[in-house]
Image (tube, rainbow, N blue to C red):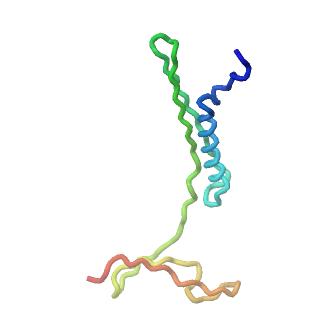
Amino acid sequence: MNDERKKNFLEIGRGAMLERFDYELDRIVDNIIDPNTPAEKPRKIQLTITFTPDATRKHIKHEVVVKSTPQPTSPIAGSTAIIEGADGVSLVELTAQIPGQYDLSGNESRQPDIIQLRKPS
């Protein structure tokens, strides 16, 4: 056989398997550098290759699935309080500082977000 035609199995199909691997590798690297994901948790790339021979055992159908398992983004935590008043029921975001109070850096604390749930009956 001519040496120029010798290929690695992952190179057949005009390099489609390697292309899919590179695509998933990009997704993994993006996930690793994302500050919203856990830094030290593992990520995976899995290649599943299925070989199905025909009845004569002369021809083999192959299928390749390449998938990655990135880490999910870190949870976003916060606290809210339920307020019942003349305006109905609302959720009010709890903040670290009293709204309007100045912190040690001289910045004024922002007003909390309010989510109106129900109007008064």
Q: Residue at x 61, y 32 (%)?
A: 14
Quarter that holds the C terminus: bottom left
Give the number of callouts: 0
Above-or-below relation of 13 to 84: above
Above-or-below relation of 63 to 87: above
Name the foreground residue: 99 vs 55.
Answer: 55
Looking at the image, the residue that sits furthest to the top is 56
Looking at the image, the residue that sits furthest to the right is 3
Residue 78: x and y in percent read: 52, 70
Name the foreground residue: 63 vs 2.
Answer: 2
Residue 86: x and y in percent read: 33, 88
**In the image: residue 17, left or right of residue 92:** right
Looking at the image, the residue that sits furthest to the left is 121
Q: Residue at x 58, y 50 (%)?
A: 71
Above-or-below relation of 108 to 65: below
**In the image: residue 27, left or right of residue 119:** right
The part of the image, by quadrant, that contains residue 37 is bottom right
Quarter that holds the N terminus: top right
Above-or-below relation of 65 to 5: below
Name the foreground residue: 4 vs 15.
Answer: 4
Name the foreground residue: 4 vs 81.
Answer: 4
Q: Residue at x 64, y 58 (%)?
A: 34
**In the image: residue 50, left or right of residue 45:** left
Residue 4: x and y in percent read: 72, 23
The part of the image, by quadrant, that contains residue 81 is bottom left
Residue 29: x and y in percent read: 66, 50
Q: Residue at x 52, y 29 (%)?
A: 63
